[in-house]
Each structure stands twice: as C-alpha cells, then as structure tokens.
Amino acid sequence: MIVFERVLKRYPGGRCGLDGVSFRLAAGEMAFLTGHSGAGKSTLLKLVGLLERPSRGQVRVLGRNLGRLPARQVHRHRREVGMVFQDHRLLMDRTLFDNVALPLVVTGTPHREITRRVRAALDQVGLRGRERALPSTLSGGEQQRVGIARAVVNRPPVLLADEPTGNLDPELSREIMALFERFNQVGVTLLVASHDLDLVKRLGHRVLTLREGVLVQDTGPR
C-alpha cells in the first residue's frame, strides 16, 4: 500500500529532509511516525500525499510510483489520500457543511451526492446536525473533527495525519486517536505523525521513528 525504497529528499540549499528511508506499510495497517521536530515526519507525509516528490529512491502508494506519476494523475492521487493537519486549515467564514464539502465541490460531485456524503462524514465524527454551524463556534477538538470529516468525505483508502492532537488536551487526544482507530477497523490505511510518545505507546500500533531524516526504529515488518 505504502512503500518507501531508499528514499532521499533534499531541498534547495542542501537541507536533507529524508535520507535513505525504507519501509512497507500494508493495506489496512495503522502506524505512527515519531521523532523530534524537524526529524522528517512532515516531509515523509508530504511525499505520500504527493505534495512533494522524492529526490532519489522510490515512493509507491496504491501501486503508483509517485516519482514518475504524470501531472494529469496528481489530482486523482490526492483524492485517494486524505490528509489531516494540526492547525485544521478550516475556512472560518464558511459553515461546517461548506468546509467538508469542499473536496467534493472541486471534483464536480453532484449536489445530492455532496449532501449525502457530507452528512455521513459529519455523523462519523460525532457532529451530526451541526452542518450550518461556523467553525468559530466549535471547540478545538470539534474543529479537528471537522478537518477529519473533510479528509474522509472522498472515502480515501489512505489517511494521513500530521500531529493531529498537537493542540489538544490528553482527553481530546485520546478521542481523536480512537476515531482514527475506528476508520482503521473498516480498512482505511493510516499513517499518523505524533510527538505524544505516551499515547502512541498505549495504543500499541507499529511505530516508525525518524532522527534527522533517517529511519532509526521500526517496530513492524520491513
């Protein structure tokens, strides 16, 4: 499902984001990325989501070699890889419905189907009936749930999360992680970057640890 083979990512100016990273994440697996700030977690997720391309090595996701994927297929790939961010990235002057519907509107989904999918996504994250609320009326944890609903509204087989609980208290963090686990239980492949080592350890999933762009620990199979 997600395969990295000796992946190097070097940025202009010579900074190295990843250095020789190799691992395989099976379909339906859930794993955590850990490491200090600047270790390469966000870079790795951006490569999976095709927000960046590798400088060397191979990144294969859903059977596609992302380093060679034609530009015309990039949007299709991004529709099949949902992304959740620490800062939510919500449109604060739009309703929850409009925020969650955005990926469907961009792809020209019929209005009736948009309505059905948005309501289903908000129901999945515990915000049923809140379609007309504005993000500013929600707590931080609820805003993160809206971001998750937007990421899954396209029903992607792969879901990425970059420090999704970084701004939340421990109880809300556990609730968000439990939500991810429910998605994983229905077959979604998840890769979650987190600095909360205690929470990661308690959940018991595979852990990949980065240090200065190098994969220094992998508790699962390669």
Image (cartoon, grey):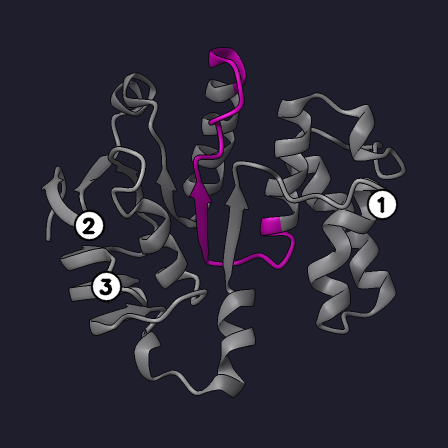
The correct choice, above or below, for 51 with respect to 31 in the image is below
Residue 3's place in the image compared with 211, above or below, is below
Q: State the separation of the CA atoms marked 3 and 2.
A: 13 Å
Mark 1: amino acid: Arg
Give the Cα distance between marks 1 and 2.
38 Å
- Residue 102 in the image: x percent, y percent? 74, 58
Which quadrant would residue 211 be assigned to in this image?
A: top left
Badge 1 density bin: few <14, some 14–19, many ≥20, Cα 10 Å: some
The one of 40 and 152 positioned closer to us in this rendering = 40
Residue 217 position, x and y percent, is 10, 39
Q: Badge 2: few (under 14), some or many (20 or more) residues near its Cα, within 10 Å?
A: many
Of the 4 image quadrants, the one containing the N terminus is: bottom left
Q: Secondary structure at mark 2?
A: loop
Density class for disc 3 (Cα within 10 Å; few <14, some 14-19, many ≥20) is few
User: What segment is highlighted magenta in the picture?
Assistant: 151-172
- Residue 123: x and y, percent? 71, 36
Along the line of sight, which residue is nearer the eye, 16 or 161? 16
Q: Residue at x 47, y 27 (%)?
A: 166
**Label 3 is placed on what type of residue?**
Gly
Helix, strand or loop at label 3? It is loop
Residue at the spot of label 2? 213
- Left or right: where does residue 93 sit relative to residue 221? right
Q: Considering only order in the chain, which callout, 1 or 3, is on the residue closer to the N terminus?
A: 3
Task: Choose the circle earlier in sequence order: 1 or 2.
Answer: 1
Earlier residue among tags 3 and 2: 3
- Magenta stretch: residue 28 in it? no
The residue tagged with tag 1: helix, strand or loop? loop
Q: Residue 169 in magenta? A: yes
Q: Is residue 29 left or right of residue 176?
A: left
Q: Give residue 37's position: percent from left, percent from top.
A: 31, 35
Q: Identify residue for label 3.
A: 14
Label 1 belongs to which residue? 94
